[in-house]
Image (tube, grey):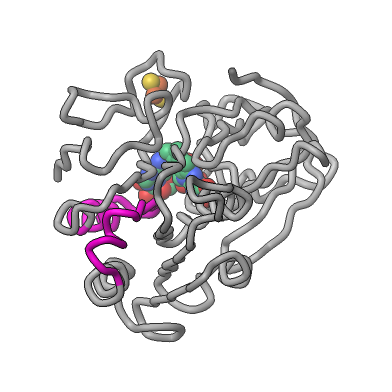
Amino acid sequence: MSIQEKCRVLKHQEIGPQRFKLTISSAYISSHAQPGQFVNVKCSDDYDPLLRRPLSIHSASSFHGRFELLYEVVGKGTELLRKTSVGNELDILGPLGKGFTVEQNKKIVVLVAGGMGVAPLLFLANNLGKTEQGTGKPPAIYVLLGAKKSDLLLCDRDFKELADQALISTDDGSYGKKGVISDLLFDLLDNEFSPEDLDNTTIYACGPRPMLQIIADISFQKKVSCQISMEAYMACGIGTCLGCVVKTKDGYKKVCDEGPVFKAEEIIWQS
Ligand SMILES: Cc1cc2nc3c(=O)[nH]c(=O)nc-3n(C[C@H](O)[C@H](O)[C@H](O)COP(=O)(O)OP(=O)(O)OC[C@H]3O[C@@H](n4cnc5c(N)ncnc54)[C@H](O)[C@@H]3O)c2cc1C
Ligand code: FES
């Protein structure tokens, strides 16, 4: 269940160019949030912009009663959010949506994060590290991180601490391998994973839609289970306006309450 509440901002840090991390107080959201879920944030005290903005939950600590959001300033809503000071209250609705489903029988997980896609995937990586899966051992965690250039790469140190292997790509080659993250995924599955490994793997991906489409194609080719977190323009965020639908093999589904996480094979990609 989600709630709407005024939540106090405890910290607001600049973590990169136009990129910020908010630490927010909420006993309810921090104790109910699951990786892949999001909150809908009212960015202004008046009616402009009218709609709340969806942001993934980046971490949650029920012990401390706080959660974190990571955001990039791209327009009016996030520009207003940037002006929020420590001590201010934000009107937040959450936690919302259906997050990642951890497949308990899989011994290997591959997290694929493009750009701001790191936001929900670090939360998932932290939880997976704690998860005792089928064999009694936590899964082997591979992390693939991609960004346009090195200064836009976020959370790489945190991921490196949690992962058995972390691979990085940047479009301009300023850090890690030059190229796109989907090439890293293809190479990993093709060169390093045996057929038995592929059967035992789940991919969890979040990032821009074109990236997700390629990741979905690769998972289909390699017959690897894959869950992706879809982005969509949202209005209500709670399943009533039908403003956020994506086409799936079972008809249109609402990203805000039937997603944002879907099985990759469900999605019918449209240009
Ligand atoms: C489930 C979900 C989780 C998200 N999590 C995060 C997150 O953790 N961190 C983060 O930085 N962003 C996240 N986003 C995207 C974020 O919601 C948008 O960047 C934000 O709403 C933009 O608001 P704005 O008013 O600043 O920009 P606007 O003025 O509304 O738009 C500015 C530009 O951003 C593009 N844009 C806006 N919203 C979206 C969208 N939903 N999908 C694709 N393009 C969009 C517009 O086309 C435009 O070019 C998430 C979106 C969804 C649906
Ligand atoms: S945003 Fe209204 S139904 Fe999804």
* Residue occupying the point 61% across, 36% down: 43
Q: Position of residue 78 (x, y in %)?
A: 56, 46
Quarter holding residue 258: top left
Residue furthest to the top in view is 240
Q: Is residue 129 left or right of residue 267?
A: right
* Residue occupying the point 62% across, 70% down: 161
Q: Is residue 25 left or right of residue 230?
A: right
Residue furthest to the front in view is 135
Count numbered badges in the picture.
Answer: 0
Q: Position of residue 267 (x, y in %)?
A: 21, 38
* Residue occupying the point 49% across, 40% down: 36
**Quadrant where the N terminus lies?**
top right
Q: Nearer the viewer, residue 89 or 202?
A: 202
Quarter holding residue 222: bottom left
Q: Position of residue 190 (x, y in %)?
A: 22, 72
Q: Is residue 202 left or right of residue 145?
A: left
Q: Which residues are magenta?
A: 193-218
Would you say residue 50 sits in the magenta stretch? no
